[in-house]
Amino acid sequence: MGYVPFILLEFLGNEVDNQVYGKALYNLKKTFFEQFGKEIDRIDVENPGFKKRTYAAHFASAVIQLIRKGNFILAIRMYFIYGTKGGMEFWSIFFKKTLSGLFRKFRLSNSM
């Protein structure tokens, strides 16, 4: 079996952008945790650390997206209200996603 050692195709997405940004993203995450908080707590009892991982995953991605779009104050606010519940897991996910994105951009810019 062989492999191709370089990227042949870069997926740029489609013209439709159905992501939410800014305050709408903040409200969406807030609503999600209000609606599913009891279920998350229940699962956390069976699987300790689930709640922390869930908060970390949701809010690390959201904070990165807010920073990319220039919503720095909202990103900081979201971190202090919700991201802190993710503890060190938040920062682990935050830096992994941030660094992988930077490396991907670096590799793409050097392969052209």
Image (cartoon, grey):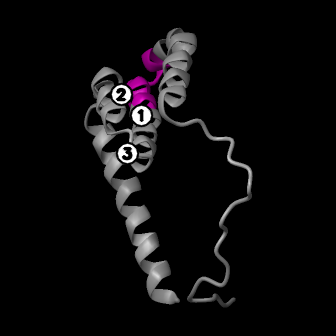
Q: Looking at the image, is mark 3 or mark 1 earlier in the sequence?
A: 1
State the residue position of label 1: 59
Disc 1 vs disc 2: Cβ atoms closer than 8 Å? yes
Comparing 37 with 50, the one in front is 37
Dividing the picture into quadrants, the one containing residue 105 is bottom left
Residue 68 location, x and y as percent? Answer: 42, 50
State the residue position of label 2: 78
Tell me the SS state at disc 3: helix
Query: Which range is magenta?
Result: 43-55
Disc 3 vs disc 1: Cβ atoms closer than 8 Å? no
Comparing 75 with 99, the one in front is 75
Q: Could you tell me how far apart the alpha carbons at marks 3 and 1 are, in whole angstroms?
A: 12 Å
Q: Looking at the image, is mark 1 or mark 2 earlier in the sequence?
A: 1
State the residue position of label 3: 67
Q: Is residue 107 above or below residue 36?
A: below
Q: Residue at x 69, y 41 (%)?
A: 18
Q: Could you tell me how far apart the alpha carbons at marks 2 and 3 are, in whole angstroms?
A: 11 Å
Tell me the SS state at disc 1: helix
Horizontally, residue 89 falls left or right of residue 69, namely left
Three-letter code for the amino acid on which mark 3 is drawn: Ile
Disc 3 packing (10 Å; few <14; some 14–19; many ≥20): some
**Magenta includes 8?**
no
Tell me the SS state at disc 2: helix
Q: Could you tell me how far apart the alpha carbons at marks 1 and 2 are, in whole angstroms?
A: 7 Å
- If the image is split into quadrants, where does the N terminus sit? bottom right
Q: Residue at x 39, y 34 (%)?
A: 56
Dividing the picture into quadrants, the one containing residue 102 is bottom left
Q: Looking at the image, is mark 2 or mark 3 earlier in the sequence?
A: 3
